[in-house]
Image (spheres, rainbow, N blue to C red):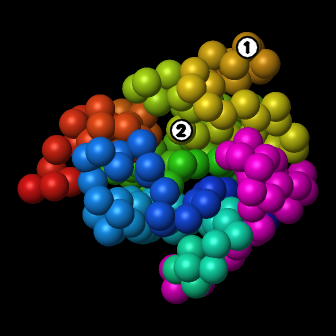
Amino acid sequence: MTVNDPVALVPIRSFAGMTRLSDTLDDADRSRLSRALASGVLEAITTAGLQAIVLTSDLDVTNWAREHEATTCGDPGTGLSDAVRAGVLTVGGAPWLAIHADLPLVTSDAIAAVADAGRSTTVLVPSYDGGTTVIASHGTFPFSYGVGSFQRHYASTPEATVIVSPELSVDIDTELGLELVPELFE
Protein backbone atom coordinates (compact mmCIF):
# COMPACT_ATOMS: atom_id res chain seq x y z
CA MET A 1 0.00 0.00 0.00
CA THR A 2 1.30 3.44 -0.92
CA VAL A 3 0.21 6.93 0.05
CA ASN A 4 -1.72 7.21 -3.24
CA ASP A 5 -3.72 4.01 -2.68
CA PRO A 6 -7.39 4.60 -2.05
CA VAL A 7 -8.68 3.98 1.45
CA ALA A 8 -11.71 1.67 1.60
CA LEU A 9 -14.54 3.13 3.69
CA VAL A 10 -16.91 0.41 4.95
CA PRO A 11 -20.04 1.64 6.75
CA ILE A 12 -21.46 -0.82 9.30
CA ARG A 13 -23.98 0.67 11.69
CA SER A 14 -24.30 -2.59 13.66
CA PHE A 15 -24.51 -6.33 13.16
CA ALA A 16 -28.08 -6.25 14.46
CA GLY A 17 -29.29 -4.61 11.27
CA MET A 18 -30.61 -6.12 8.05
CA THR A 19 -34.11 -5.52 9.43
CA ARG A 20 -35.67 -5.78 5.97
CA LEU A 21 -34.86 -9.50 6.24
CA SER A 22 -36.63 -9.95 9.59
CA ASP A 23 -39.50 -11.89 7.97
CA THR A 24 -36.97 -14.35 6.54
CA LEU A 25 -34.19 -14.56 9.14
CA ASP A 26 -34.28 -14.32 12.91
CA ASP A 27 -32.03 -11.88 14.81
CA ALA A 28 -29.23 -14.39 15.36
CA ASP A 29 -29.15 -15.48 11.69
CA ARG A 30 -29.16 -11.87 10.48
CA SER A 31 -26.28 -11.04 12.83
CA ARG A 32 -24.27 -14.09 11.66
CA LEU A 33 -24.96 -13.23 8.02
CA SER A 34 -23.99 -9.59 8.52
CA ARG A 35 -20.70 -10.55 10.20
CA ALA A 36 -19.87 -13.14 7.54
CA LEU A 37 -20.56 -10.73 4.67
CA ALA A 38 -18.57 -7.93 6.29
CA SER A 39 -15.66 -10.30 6.94
CA GLY A 40 -15.64 -11.26 3.27
CA VAL A 41 -15.60 -7.62 2.21
CA LEU A 42 -12.73 -6.78 4.59
CA GLU A 43 -10.75 -9.81 3.40
CA ALA A 44 -11.20 -8.73 -0.24
CA ILE A 45 -10.13 -5.16 0.62
CA THR A 46 -7.00 -6.40 2.40
CA THR A 47 -6.15 -8.82 -0.41
CA ALA A 48 -6.52 -5.93 -2.88
CA GLY A 49 -3.84 -4.13 -0.86
CA LEU A 50 -6.06 -1.37 0.51
CA GLN A 51 -6.47 -0.03 4.02
CA ALA A 52 -9.98 -0.41 5.44
CA ILE A 53 -11.71 2.10 7.67
CA VAL A 54 -14.94 0.82 9.20
CA LEU A 55 -17.47 3.60 9.73
CA THR A 56 -19.34 2.81 12.94
CA SER A 57 -20.17 3.97 16.43
CA ASP A 58 -21.18 0.50 17.59
CA LEU A 59 -18.83 -1.03 20.19
CA ASP A 60 -19.34 -4.59 18.91
CA VAL A 61 -18.50 -3.55 15.33
CA THR A 62 -15.53 -1.49 16.58
CA ASN A 63 -14.10 -4.52 18.42
CA TRP A 64 -14.73 -6.73 15.37
CA ALA A 65 -12.95 -4.20 13.11
CA ARG A 66 -9.91 -4.18 15.39
CA GLU A 67 -9.82 -8.00 15.28
CA HIS A 68 -9.74 -7.67 11.48
CA GLU A 69 -6.94 -5.07 11.65
CA ALA A 70 -9.16 -2.27 10.34
CA THR A 71 -9.31 1.19 11.83
CA THR A 72 -12.61 2.86 12.65
CA CYS A 73 -14.23 6.23 12.22
CA GLY A 74 -17.30 7.36 14.11
CA ASP A 75 -20.68 7.18 12.42
CA PRO A 76 -22.75 10.29 13.21
CA GLY A 77 -25.87 8.09 13.28
CA THR A 78 -27.83 10.17 10.79
CA GLY A 79 -27.81 7.77 7.85
CA LEU A 80 -25.53 6.07 5.37
CA SER A 81 -24.76 9.20 3.34
CA ASP A 82 -23.61 11.09 6.43
CA ALA A 83 -21.54 8.13 7.66
CA VAL A 84 -19.62 7.93 4.39
CA ARG A 85 -19.28 11.72 4.25
CA ALA A 86 -17.64 11.58 7.70
CA GLY A 87 -15.25 8.90 6.44
CA VAL A 88 -14.31 11.00 3.42
CA LEU A 89 -13.54 13.94 5.70
CA THR A 90 -11.29 11.68 7.76
CA VAL A 91 -9.11 10.76 4.76
CA GLY A 92 -8.87 14.36 3.55
CA GLY A 93 -7.95 14.64 -0.12
CA ALA A 94 -6.73 11.04 -0.40
CA PRO A 95 -8.49 8.78 -2.89
CA TRP A 96 -11.21 6.69 -1.29
CA LEU A 97 -13.55 3.85 -2.09
CA ALA A 98 -16.91 3.63 -0.28
CA ILE A 99 -18.06 0.02 -0.33
CA HIS A 100 -21.04 -1.72 1.23
CA ALA A 101 -20.37 -4.48 3.75
CA ASP A 102 -23.05 -6.86 2.45
CA LEU A 103 -21.57 -8.01 -0.88
CA PRO A 104 -21.52 -11.83 -1.02
CA LEU A 105 -19.76 -12.11 -4.40
CA VAL A 106 -17.04 -9.52 -3.73
CA THR A 107 -13.52 -10.26 -4.94
CA SER A 108 -10.24 -8.50 -4.42
CA ASP A 109 -9.82 -8.20 -8.19
CA ALA A 110 -13.14 -6.37 -8.52
CA ILE A 111 -12.20 -3.99 -5.70
CA ALA A 112 -8.74 -3.41 -7.20
CA ALA A 113 -10.27 -2.59 -10.61
CA VAL A 114 -12.59 0.03 -9.12
CA ALA A 115 -9.82 1.43 -6.91
CA ASP A 116 -7.48 1.74 -9.89
CA ALA A 117 -10.10 3.53 -11.99
CA GLY A 118 -10.96 5.78 -9.04
CA ARG A 119 -7.44 7.18 -8.88
CA SER A 120 -8.18 9.45 -11.85
CA THR A 121 -11.97 9.78 -11.96
CA THR A 122 -15.13 9.18 -9.98
CA VAL A 123 -16.42 5.62 -10.33
CA LEU A 124 -19.96 4.41 -9.64
CA VAL A 125 -20.89 0.74 -9.33
CA PRO A 126 -24.66 0.12 -9.57
CA SER A 127 -26.37 -2.66 -7.66
CA TYR A 128 -28.79 -5.08 -9.31
CA ASP A 129 -31.72 -3.18 -7.77
CA GLY A 130 -30.80 0.43 -8.65
CA GLY A 131 -28.67 1.25 -5.63
CA THR A 132 -24.98 2.10 -5.53
CA THR A 133 -22.75 -0.52 -3.90
CA VAL A 134 -19.38 1.14 -4.51
CA ILE A 135 -18.28 4.72 -5.17
CA ALA A 136 -14.63 5.64 -5.72
CA SER A 137 -13.31 9.19 -5.91
CA HIS A 138 -11.24 11.73 -3.98
CA GLY A 139 -12.38 14.76 -2.05
CA THR A 140 -16.02 15.50 -1.38
CA PHE A 141 -18.92 13.75 -3.13
CA PRO A 142 -22.71 14.40 -3.11
CA PHE A 143 -23.74 11.14 -1.42
CA SER A 144 -27.43 10.32 -1.73
CA TYR A 145 -27.89 6.70 -0.68
CA GLY A 146 -31.27 5.03 -0.46
CA VAL A 147 -33.67 3.43 -2.93
CA GLY A 148 -32.69 4.41 -6.47
CA SER A 149 -29.40 5.98 -5.38
CA PHE A 150 -27.52 5.08 -8.56
CA GLN A 151 -29.64 7.45 -10.66
CA ARG A 152 -29.14 10.29 -8.16
CA HIS A 153 -25.41 9.67 -7.93
CA TYR A 154 -25.03 9.53 -11.71
CA ALA A 155 -27.19 12.63 -12.22
CA SER A 156 -24.98 14.56 -9.80
CA THR A 157 -21.74 13.31 -11.40
CA PRO A 158 -22.50 12.56 -15.08
CA GLU A 159 -18.77 12.52 -15.86
CA ALA A 160 -18.34 9.47 -13.60
CA THR A 161 -17.16 6.18 -14.99
CA VAL A 162 -19.75 3.44 -14.47
CA ILE A 163 -18.41 -0.03 -13.82
CA VAL A 164 -20.95 -2.83 -13.93
CA SER A 165 -19.43 -5.63 -11.88
CA PRO A 166 -21.18 -8.93 -11.14
CA GLU A 167 -18.92 -9.32 -8.09
CA LEU A 168 -20.01 -5.96 -6.68
CA SER A 169 -23.61 -5.63 -7.88
CA VAL A 170 -25.33 -8.02 -5.49
CA ASP A 171 -25.96 -6.78 -1.98
CA ILE A 172 -27.99 -8.57 0.65
CA ASP A 173 -30.53 -6.11 1.98
CA THR A 174 -33.76 -7.72 0.77
CA GLU A 175 -35.14 -11.22 0.24
CA LEU A 176 -34.36 -10.87 -3.47
CA GLY A 177 -30.69 -10.43 -2.61
CA LEU A 178 -30.82 -13.69 -0.65
CA GLU A 179 -32.51 -15.43 -3.58
CA LEU A 180 -29.71 -14.31 -5.90
CA VAL A 181 -27.13 -16.09 -3.71
CA PRO A 182 -28.90 -19.22 -2.36
CA GLU A 183 -25.62 -20.97 -1.49
CA LEU A 184 -25.34 -18.67 1.54
CA PHE A 185 -27.78 -21.02 3.27
CA GLU A 186 -26.83 -24.42 1.89
The image quadrant that residue 2 belongs to is bottom right
Where residue 1 appears, x then y in whole percent?
65, 68
On the picture, is 162 further left or further right than 96?
left
Is residue 69 something one can see in this rendering?
no
Where residue 72 appears, x then y in whole percent?
70, 73
Where residue 30 appears, x then y in whole percent?
35, 60
Residue 87 part of the magenta segment: yes
The image quadrant that residue 3 belongs to is bottom right
116 or 163, nearer to the observer: 163
Q: Could you tell me which secondary element the residue under label 1 belongs to?
A: helix
Q: What range of the chain is rendered magenta?
A: 66-94
Quadrant for the C terminus, please. bottom left
Where residue 116 appears, x then y in whole percent?
62, 44
Of mark 2 and mark 1, the one earlier in the sequence is 2
Residue 123 part of the magenta segment: no
On the picture, is 98 further left or further right than 20?
right
Question: What's the residue at 71%, 46% (across, down)?
Answer: 79
Q: Which residue is mark 1?
A: 155
Q: Mark 2 and mark 1: span between their CA atoms?
A: 16 Å
Task: Look at label 2 and name its amino acid.
Answer: Thr
Q: Is residue 175 above or below residue 28?
A: above
On the picture, is 172 further left or further right than 134?
left
Q: Could you tell me which secondary element the residue under label 2 belongs to?
A: strand
Task: Look at label 1 and name its amino acid.
Answer: Ala
Q: Which residue is mark 2?
A: 133
Q: Is residue 42 above or below residue 138?
A: below
Task: Kindly check if marks 2 and 1 are in contact, taking CB atoms under 8 A apart as contact.
Answer: no
Question: What's the residue at 56%, 79% (across, down)?
Answer: 60
